Amino acid sequence: MKKLEDIGFLVARVLMPILFISAGWGKITGYEGTAQYMQSAGVPAFMLPLVILLEFGGGLAILFGFLTRFTALSTAVFTILTAFLFHSHFEVAGNEINFMKNLSIAGGYLLLGITGSGAFSIDRLLGKKW
């Protein structure tokens, strides 16, 4: 049963960050447009490098199981903040479902932050729980 659990953690760690790695890369390649969008929502543009670090860098960290607990908990908080900052205007089409998706994603990352990365991870190789 432990082997199946470890494979499950690996599959989850491969699937969960796909959205964040892709979004982070999009912010890198569309930096100016993203900065303007953030400012239109009241988020200062100087925060964009931190967002990219969390989405792209954090997504890669989750993928490889490095600093998993810290990164997963940070991503859960970030995703909840994003839900309220960018998707809480339910009169705009699509925002309600995106708000709920963000909360669901945050729940998954919260669980990963509590449980850790599993056996097939850099964290396990280093013997760290972070």
Image: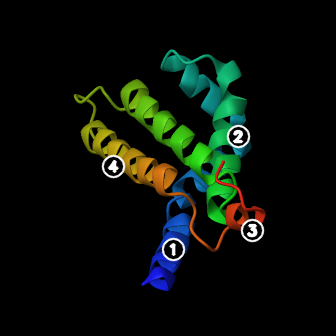
The tag on residue 53 is: 2
Q: What residue type is labelled 2?
A: Leu
The location of residue 24, given as percent across then percent down, is 64, 46
**Which residue is labeled 1 in the image?**
11
Of labels 3 and 1, the one closer to you:
3
Labels 3 and 4 touching (C-beta < 8 A) = no
Q: Extreme left residue here?
A: 91
Badge 1 or badge 2: first in the primary sequence: 1
Q: Extreme right residue here?
A: 126
The tag on residue 104 is: 4
Quarter-wise, where is residue 36 in the image? top right
Would residue 68 be found to the left or right of residue 86 on screen? Answer: right
Q: What residue type is labelled 1?
A: Val
Of labels 2 and 3, the one closer to you:
3
**Which residue is labeled 3 in the image?**
125
Q: What residue type is labelled 4?
A: Ser
Q: Which amino acid does label 3 sit on?
A: Leu
Label 1 crowding class (10 Å Cα cut-off): few <14, some 14-19, many 20+?
few
Badge 1 or badge 4: first in the primary sequence: 1
Asked if residue 12 shows in the view, the reply is: yes
